[in-house]
């Protein structure tokens, strides 16, 4: 279970990333943020976001048009 959950369904790029960046401020180092999104471009966006920020994309999946991401916050 994630420490925090962000529902970004219905939002298009770049809003899911911007909201995740803001939500990560409330997540302690080593904690996790779960993001739910419907934008198909969010997969590539979150992969790039984690590479650039040093956070770990622990998992991502898609179910019925909803994309699920689990990010572990780095220091």
Image (spheres, rainbow, N blue to C red):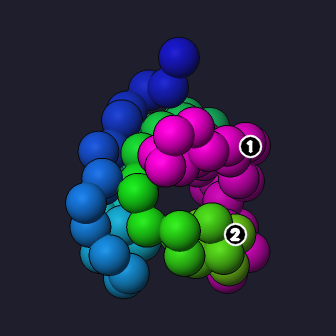
Give the quarter of the image for residue 47: bottom right
**Which region shows up in magenta?**
50-75
Give the percent coordinates (x, y) of residue 23.
31, 53
Is 16 displayed left or right of 10 in the figure? right
Give the percent coordinates (x, y) of residue 6.
32, 44
Label total for image: 2
Is 55 displayed left or right of 66 in the figure? right
- Check the image and report above or below for 24 versus 45: above
Name the residue tied to disc 2. 47
Say what secondary structure mark 2 lies in. Answer: helix
Give the percent coordinates (x, y) of residue 38.
41, 57
Give the quarter of the image for residue 58: top right
- Check the image and report above or below for 40 versus 13: above
| Image marks 2 and 1: residues in contact by CB distance under 8 Å | no
Is residue 54 magenta-colored? yes
Name the residue tied to disc 1. 58
In the foreground, 36 or 64: 64
Q: Which residue is drawn at 50% across and 26% down?
A: 2
- Check the image and report above or below for 32 versus 45: above
Give the percent coordinates (x, y) of residue 66.
47, 46
Question: Crowding near pointer 1: few (<14 within 10 Å), some, many (20+)?
Answer: few
């Amino acid at each position: 279970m994630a420490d925090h959950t962000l529902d970004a369904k219905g939002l298009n790029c770049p809003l899911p990333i911007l909201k995740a960046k803001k939500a990560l401020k409330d997540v302690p180092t080593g904690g996790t943020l779960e993001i739910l999104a419907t934008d198909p471009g969010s997969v590539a966006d979150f992969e790039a976001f984690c590479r650039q920020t040093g956070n770990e994309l622990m998992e991502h999946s898609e179910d019925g048009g909803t994309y699920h991401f689990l990010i572990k916050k780095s220091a």
